[in-house]
Image: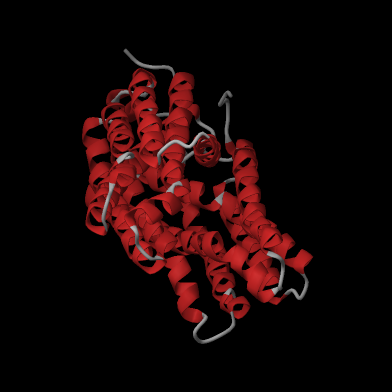
Amino acid sequence: MERSPRGARVATYVYFVLCGTLMGAWVVHIPAVEERVGISHATLGGLLVLLGLGAFVGMQVAGPLTDRLGARVVVPAAGVLCGATLVLPGLARDPWTLAGSLLVFGFCNGCLDVSMNAHAVHVEKAYGRPVMSGFHATFSVGGVLAALVAAGSTSAGLHPAATLAAVGAVGVVIALASARALMPAASAADSTGSTGSTDTVEETHASPPAARRGTARRVWLLAVLALMVMLCEGAANDWSALHLKDVRGAPAGTAAFAYGTFAAAMTTGRLLADRFVARFGSLAILRHGAATAAVGITLVALGPWTWAAFVGWALFGLGLSGCVPQLFSAAGHADPAAAGANVSRVAGLGYVGMLAGPAVIGWLTHLVPLDHAFVLLTLLCAATAVGARVLRTESGPTPRSEMAGVGH
């Protein structure tokens, strides 16, 4: 039986919140796990690479699998596995068991990440209007929920493994309970019909080899843009507070608000982005968003005052907020029959950028001061703004001004 797009949309929101909560639950318990295992910050940093490696592999596996079996099978399965493996890092007693648990949990998280994004593409196609940014905003909501749960459990004196097990168990239940509302594979394929732009029709009637080559080139261009955007995001996550403290001389308490400002602007932007995409198109959001981010990080790098840094981080987060959802959406709509595989390529390379961002900035600080190292982020944002023209050929939902008779 075909499920309603509205129900599938709600279920997709649930899975995005779930993914954010499960990952956030691990992140907020990192200090406790580090102390329990008895490792240094340097060792922990190396082990976290395994989390990223597992996620990358999971993304490449889950993408094609979602295209073959359908998101209604893969998404809940990945959610169950992600919830079930969340407790493993909390049970680790030495670096080796922690390494294995992070690799497994990262793999399951990567599977959930890509499969739910592939399903989000089909939901967006069924709606005939942009909804992808809203899904990504709810991922951040999951992180907030995880922080609240961790604060409560820590105050109650609960062991990290107990909290992770409880959150994971609830996650398993939610993943199973939400599965019925997801769109079946046939329904997802049918949603590629009448809501696409003329680019979809032209590509459908083109010779299959030529169409596949053109789509593959476009997807890899989107992946490169995702690499640059997410490298910027990763750098902000790890260096924003340190910049305010070490370069601007702000107290530690004040410096912590640098990342908070960036994250709040990012979440707010994603909550609002879909409306702007519907009106102006994804190309405009990517181009002007990347340009805004370039202005913001330049203000951070060159502005001599603390208030200027806060304004810069806010502009940086606001500008970046709509970029990644547009790239994921465009990858999925490039060939809806292979949405999972295409999203996995873009998400995978973007995830490499997310992990590399902090390291690249750290390496540059051996050559130039931290604020000058941020100029690299300015260049990456500017390159993204220029490269945004690749979205001219996307086949996803069109701006409202170009849509005829598509209801809300």
Give the residue displayed 43% in from the left and 33% down from the top. 18
Q: Quadrant of the C terminus?
A: top right
Check the image and report above or below for 408 versus 140. Answer: above
Q: Is residue 385 left or right of residue 222?
A: right
Residue at the farthest top position: 1
Check the image and report above or below for 222 versus 86. Answer: below
Residue at the farthest bottom position: 367
Residue 207 visible from this viewpoint: no
Question: Relative to the observer, which residue lies in front, 220 or 293?
Answer: 293
The colour scheme used to paint the residues is secondary structure
Question: Residue 251 in the image: x percent, y percent?
Answer: 71, 65
Give the residue displayed 29% in from the left and 38% down from the top. 337
Give the residue displayed 54% in from the left and 52% down from the top. 323
Question: Residue 229 in the image: x percent, y percent?
Answer: 50, 60
Q: Quadrant of the N terminus?
A: top left
Q: How many marks?
A: 0
Check the image and report above or below for 45 versus 122. Answer: below
Image quadrant assignment for residue 201: top left
Question: Residue 186 in the image: x percent, y percent?
Answer: 28, 24
Give the residue displayed 27% in from the left and 47% down from the top. 107
Residue at the farthest front position: 157
Question: Relative to the observer, which residue lies in front, 46 or 400?
Answer: 46
Question: Residue 123 in the image: x percent, y percent?
Answer: 43, 30
Question: Relative to the observer, which residue lies in front, 69 or 260?
Answer: 260
Image quadrant assignment for residue 403: top right
Residue 222 visible from this viewpoint: yes
